[in-house]
Image (spheres, helix red, strand yellow):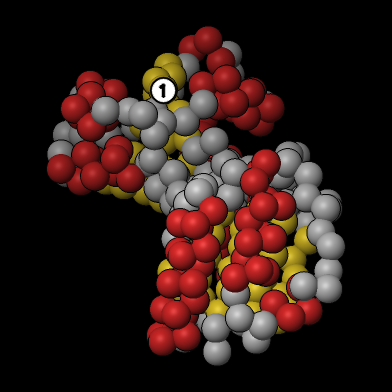
Amino acid sequence: MPGKLFLIPNLIAPDAWQTLSPQVLQILPGITYFLAEDLKNARRFLSALKIMGPIENLQFELFDKNTDKKTIHTLLEPLKAGYDVGVLSDSGCPGVADPGALAVAYAHQINAEVIPLVGPSSILLALMASGLNGQCFAFQGYLPIENEKRAKAIKEFEKESAKRKQTQLFIETPYRNTTTFAELVKHLQSSTKLTVAYTITSASQFIKTKPVSEWRKTSLAFEKEPCVFLFLSE
């Protein structure tokens, strides 16, 4: 009988330990096998919790966006053998803007129980705090890097937003936050509502929703920290 696959959320802001649920802290000590998006960060995270015993006794396997689908059965051999395994995201929740879905799909194939644990998700927290439509929304990942393709994508997503009254959500590589904000303000219609959700759950958290016309009068200084962008064309 296979073990259980636990999906373990990680902090999305440094030292925001209050965002981890008691359930996570109760379950973690019983897991010795982990798939981690970043091995160094995973060890640091578990060590800081001070509930795991010697880190040297834990087994970690790298599981990131470059993991080959053909190797997942090898990485999850302990799960198939009956041991519980934790999938640990580098930030936020496994499987959401994260490569965890590959491990989950394999767990379903071998009839292993999949248990998602409650924790911080910048995407859902940003949507909750935006005031935009939470009944119909679409997470679009990253916008294209090339200027022309990015402008085209913004306009197409805005048309879809207007047509379906659908909130559009994006994340960005932190060093491109300033560029992405500038491009959104440039290409969106003046009446479209735009939300900037920056360093969510941190002491410097910034979440604001304004029409694009007002954002055009605003100057934002982004540090290289995580940001979620949302917009709704009404």
Q: Point out the residue furthest to the top here.
A: 56
- Residue at x 68%, y 60% (from the top left corner): 181
Q: Position of residue 88 (x, y in %)?
A: 48, 35
Q: Is residue 123 above or below residue 5?
A: below
Q: Is residue 30 visible?
A: no
Left or right placement of residue 76 versus residue 152 in this view: left
Say which residue label 1 marks. Answer: 62
Q: Position of residue 184 (x, y in %)?
A: 62, 66
Q: Is residue 57 visible?
A: yes
Q: Position of residue 161 (x, y in %)?
A: 46, 80
Q: Position of residue 201 (x, y in %)?
A: 72, 54
Residues 163 and 209: in front is: 163
Left or right placement of residue 145 versus residue 45 in this view: left
Q: Is residue 163 above or below residue 175?
A: below
Q: Residues within 10 Å of mark 1 (few under 14, many from 20)?
A: some
- Residue at x 44%, y 44% (from the top left corner): 98
